[in-house]
Amino acid sequence: MSLTTVILNDPELGRLLGKRGTTSDITLYNRRLGGEIFIFVEPGQEKLGALLQAIAMADAAIVRMDALTPEIGEMLLALDMLGKRQGLLILEGLTEEQVLPVLRGTVAEGYATVERDFNAIISELGGFSHESTPPCRVEVDHAFTVRSVGTVVLGNVKGGRIERHMELTLLPQGREVLVRSIQIQDENVAHAEAGDRVGLALKGISSEEIERGAVLTPEPESFTVSREVELDFAPCPYFRGELKAGMRCMLGAGLSYRAAVIKDLYEAGENTLRLVVEAERRLVLTPGQPVIVARPEVRGLRLAGSGTVV
């Protein structure tokens, strides 16, 4: 089993739970226990894009709640908008009765409370499962060049099975690439399944051409690559700003975080809003995919709402 968990509001917990690995605006920690592999993802404290990307990478969440702050409220709303129903709460200086009103109505209402203890946390995570949804794909979060190996990408297999020597399409570019080798936890393997975190050595493209949010898939026809995104949209009731045509915003779609402009916002039926936005660069999308609309420049809550791709 392999499980990826995002850690929120606890910059020291990753070191307790795993060995430090890849570090950028997102830091990853790894732990192998028998046949189980646990990946922990910690976003940078200040960057909204890193927060949304780290949550999108994860199968589950651990949230440390030491105060009822707007920052923690924003994290909980992001988890809810992205549908992360598996999670744990670490309460420090707060009781369950105090936090329940904040959690009510969100996915975090179903999170179990756990002590900040290695064995307790790992035991709870062992009961969770990884996300696996079609189509077959690897969502890329890092890319770099290794001497004598060439282009290497890191990412999670989100659906299907990836095999060595498989030909894949890299989106949004639409480039054909060959999987030269696959590693899981620095060990060479012949294939990887949904849930696995992999390092893929690729032939046919340079690392400079790949950015976070790229998708590798043998099923490119299952995706839409476009700058324009149409959403069934739900405004966040706690957002104090406004949304209107011509306004700039940011989109969190999978592991992509893109600047965009709102083209239209209108009623598409009873209790249904439709939002049309145009991103500055192409996005890789699937129908029903959750997308967060943010305005990071506003004071207070930065999440304006979320929707699913039409």
Image (cartoon, grey):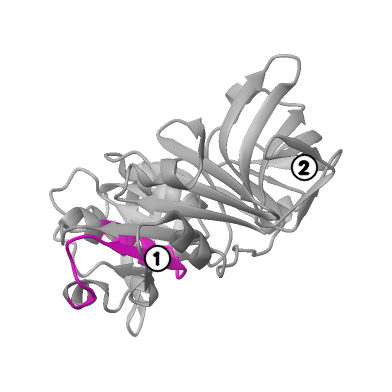
Does the magenta run of residues contain 94? yes
| Residue 305 seen by the camera | no
Residue 93 showing in the rendered view: yes
Circle 1 or circle 2, nearest the eye: 1
Q: How crowded is mark 2: few (under 14 residues within 10 Å), some or many (20 or more)?
A: many
- Where's the N terminus, which quadrant? bottom right
Q: Where is residue 78 in the image (x, y as percent from the top left)?
A: 34, 59
Whether 290 is drawn above or below 106: the answer is above
Q: Which amino acid does label 2 sit on?
A: Leu
Residue 181 is left or right of residue 112, and the answer is right
What is the residue that sits farthest to the bottom in this orientation?
A: 270
Which residue is depicted at the point 85% across and 43% down?
190
| Front-most of residues 120 and 209 | 120
Asked if residue 119 lies in the magenta stretch, the reply is no
In the rendered view, tell whether residue 41 sits above or below residue 210.
below
Cβ atoms at labels 1 and 2 below 8 Å apart: no
Instruction: Please state the extent of the stretch shown in magenta in the rendering.
Output: 74-97
Residue 156: give x, y in percent of width and height. 62, 48
Which residue is rendered at x = 67% and y = 51% of the image? 196
Q: Which amino acid does label 1 sit on?
A: Leu
276 in relation to 273, above or below: above
- In the rendered image of this protein, does residue 134 appear above or below residue 187? below
Residue nearest the observer in this picture, 244 or 40: 40
Q: Mark 1 points at which residue?
A: 88
36 vs 239, nearest the viewer: 36
- Residue ID for mark 2: 168
Label 1 sits on a secondary structure element that is strand
Q: In this view, does 145 lie to the left or right of 237?
A: right
Q: Which mark is residue 221?
A: none
